[in-house]
Image: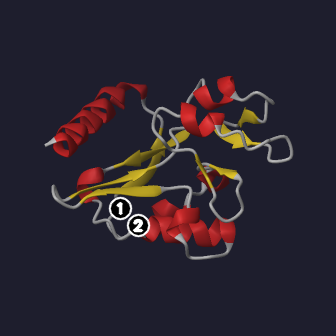
Amino acid sequence: MNELVVLAERCTGCETCAIVCSLSHEGRANPVESRIAVIKNERQGVNFPLVCAQCETPTCKLVCPVAAIHVERGIVRTDLTKCVGCRMCVLSCPLGATSMNSVTHQIIRCDLCDGDPLCVRFCPEDAIQYAPLDVGQAHLRRERVQNLVALLDR
């Protein structure tokens, strides 16, 4: 199984990933409708593509009052026919990677483009990669996030 790996130090904040995502899923080039958000701290010169981590035990699934969220082949999905728009999943996401589409008013999160993430293919700096899940590398990912948080806190 693969996972999205974000290399924030490579991200220039161009938002190509968000534009490609919204075009693919919504048919419009509108980063607000994207399943990936580029968090920018212009003062520190830090950019970070934020995307659903596809949690093994998703908090969003646990809090959904209508059981609209399920995991299918390692991808967290929302059954929009069941979803009542309560936004509990948005509030519970520890990364802030689940959102509501401001145009359609439906819950959106990364679905990894069903195993072929377009953000990876189109990122001009290779800041987003789709790589095999390597439990041994988990400490490196945590260290990267801690370094990023330290930069943003300055």
For the N terminus, give its image quadrant.
Answer: top right
Which residue appears at 41% of the width and 68% of the height?
15
**Is residue 79 left or right of 22 when viewed as pictured?**
right
Q: Which mark is residue 151?
A: none
Quadrant housing residue 58: top right
**Which residue in the structure is indicated by mark 2?**
123
**Is residue 145 left or right of 19 when viewed as pictured?**
left
Q: Position of residue 141 (x, y in %)?
A: 32, 35
**Which residue in the structure is indicated by mark 1?**
126
The residues tagged by marks 1 and 2 sit, at their Cα atoms, a distance apart of 5 Å
Quadrant housing residue 89: top right
Circle 1: residue type: Asp
Which residue appears at 16% of the width and 59% of the height?
43
Q: Residue furthest front?
A: 86
Q: Position of residue 144 (x, y in %)?
A: 26, 38
Residue 122 lies, with reference to residue 3, above or below; the image says: below
Residue 57 lies, with reference to residue 124, above or below; the image says: above
Circle 2: residue type: Cys
Of helix, strand and loop, which one carries label 2? loop
Residue 64 lies, with reference to residue 97, above or below; the image says: above
* Total residue callouts: 2
For the C terminus, give its image quadrant.
Answer: top left
Q: Position of residue 119 (x, y in %)?
A: 49, 62
Q: Are marks 1 and 2 in contact (CB under 8 Å)?
A: yes
